[in-house]
Amino acid sequence: MEDTFRHKGLRKRLVETLKSKGIKDETVLEAINLIPRHFFLDKAFEEKAYEDQAMPIDEGQTISQPYTVAYQTELLMPKKRIKILEIGTGSGYQAAILGIMGARVYTVERHELLYQKAKKIIDSLGLLNVRCYFGDGNKGLGEFAPFDRILLTCAATEIPQLLLKQLSIGGMMVLPLGDSNFQIMTRVTKLTEDEFKYEKFDKFRFVPFLSGKNEIN
Ligand code: SAH
């Protein structure tokens, strides 16, 4: 797939839209400006790739709205070389955004098909600091813990305790927390091994955080 001047122009417009909706972090806006979102969508949706909308991907899942990606990324405060665990790779777009910002990204997806597709695009972009895994995000990735940040891009009904254990002291987890109707964006900071700070932000609507894996037959 090609990244043409037209795509780049549409991306600049998207960045302006996100600014007007309240996204301030220049490093986040620059990442949105750099990553070709149309690479992560089927050809049929290419025309809509730079509208501020969620879009269908395979397996009945969605690529998050660019505003939501920018919002979660801003709350997560990524920095170069820190370790980030993302649960819910989906298209791989959010992982690519974190990757281009210089973090070491570990992203987990429960649908094998989505995992394979995302890995291919991320590899083709040369993002060597983003590693994709096929598995159940409920388990996290114990072998690479602790993580400085954990990001859930699917809706959790409660804070996953096992994932909190895989967070470093001083680390932060950002997750949409609530029922299937809506979730409150929540940021949990791990102060000590058993003390946490909780902050609540705006309402969103994500696809659910499920259990188990879904292999290609
Ligand atoms: N971050 C994605 C948006 C993904 S939508 C993007 O940028 O495109 C949420 C994803 O979470 C879906 O792909 C869904 O399959 C996945 N998911 C849900 N429960 C999961 C679990 N237990 N482990 C891993 N992935 C999960």
Image (tube, rainbow, N blue to C red):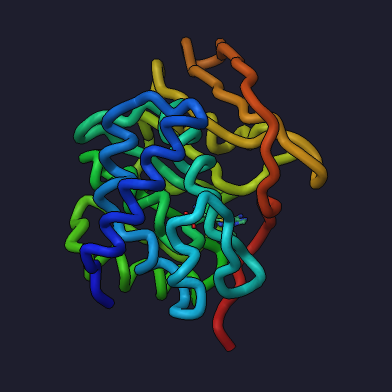
85 vs 123, nearest the viewer: 123
Disc tally is 0
Can residue 71 be seen? yes
Q: In which quarter of the image is the C terminus?
A: bottom right
> On the picture, is 207 further left or further right than 168?
right
* Residue 24 x/y as whole percent: 38, 24
Q: In this view, does 50 lie above or below 13?
A: below
> On the picture, is 5 further left or further right than 144?
left
* Residue 131 x/y as whole percent: 30, 57
Q: In which quarter of the image is ligand 1?
A: bottom right
User: Which residue is drawn at the image coordinates 25% and 39% (left, top)?
Assistant: 101
* Residue 207 x/y as whole percent: 68, 54
169 vs 120, nearest the viewer: 120
Can residue 165 be seen? no
> On the picture, is 63 further left or further right than 106?
right
Q: Quadrant of the N terminus?
A: bottom left
Where residue 125 sits, quadrant-wise, is: bottom left
181 vs 129, nearest the viewer: 181
60 vs 34, nearest the viewer: 34
* Residue 129 x/y as whole percent: 22, 51
Q: In this view, does 160 lie above or below 120?
A: above
User: Which residue is drawn at the image coordinates 49% and 35% (left, top)?
Assistant: 72
Q: Is residue 93 above or below residue 188?
A: below
Q: In this view, does 46 lie above or below 27?
A: below
> On the picture, is 81 further left or further right than 49?
left
User: Which residue is drawn at the image coordinates 61% and 26% (left, top)?
Assistant: 186
User: Which residue is drawn at the image coordinates 58% and 55% (left, top)?
Assistant: 54
Q: Residue furthest bottom?
A: 217
Where residue 212 sits, quadrant-wise, is: bottom right
